[in-house]
Image (cartoon, helix red, strand yellow):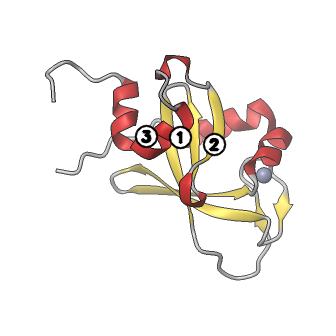
Amino acid sequence: MSEKSHTAADLLRELFPESHREIFGERSSEKAPTLGLYPVADGRLALVHGDQLAEFTPLPPKGNAALHCDLCHHTRSRSEAHIYRVVVAARRTRYLTLCSPTEGCQQRAGQQNLEALADRIFPIETIHAE
Ligand SMILES: [Zn+2]
């Protein structure tokens, strides 16, 4: 580790190396997408807003209750949505319900709802495992 200060992009690569690679590929994150949800490995979603990134981990389905999508605000059946866990700080976890697949959901939701969702998640407190 060098002594130079880390940029947000460096931090992202450290926190979510796999998602970072899947979303940004080999190119530099200077041209990062500004806002969106991106499917990554193992059914997870990555929420990207500028140079911030959060990983949504799906929880195993439980029960048959209808779900209310936190992004497009449609009511979905249990098979049309997933509940995701997002760790936003060392001891703080948020749960979000989102339709799957996410593409149509984001189209229904539009930019404004995506921004509202990002506001609920970011900033993520950096967790250092020491
Ligand atoms: Zn939705």
Tell me if mark 1 has few (under 14), some (14-19) or many (20+) residues whose alpha carbon lies within 10 angstroms of its own: some
Q: Residue at x 65, y 75 (%)?
A: 61
Check disc 1 and give the amino acid type: Glu
Label 3 SS:
loop
Where residue 95 sits: x, y (%)? 57, 59
The mark nearer the N terminus, 3 or 2, is 2
Residue tagged 3 = 124
Q: Nearer the viewer, mark 3 or mark 2?
A: 2
Check disc 3 and give the amino acid type: Ile
Q: Which mark is residue 22?
A: 1
Where residue 82 sits: x, y (%)? 68, 64
Residue tagged 2 = 38
Label 1 SS:
helix
Horizontal relation, residue 70 to residue 124: left or right: right
Q: Nearer the viewer, mark 1 or mark 2?
A: 1
The N terminus - image quarter: top left
Q: Residue at x 55, y 60 (%)?
A: 42
Tell me if mark 3 has few (under 14), some (14-19) or many (20+) residues whose alpha carbon lies within 10 angstroms of its own: some
Alpha carbon separation for disc pair 1 and 2: 9 Å
Label 2 SS:
strand
Q: Are the residues tagged 1 and 2 within 8 Å (C-beta)? A: yes
Where residue 97 sits: x, y (%)? 68, 59
Tell me if mark 2 has few (under 14), some (14-19) or many (20+) residues whose alpha carbon lies within 10 angstroms of its own: some
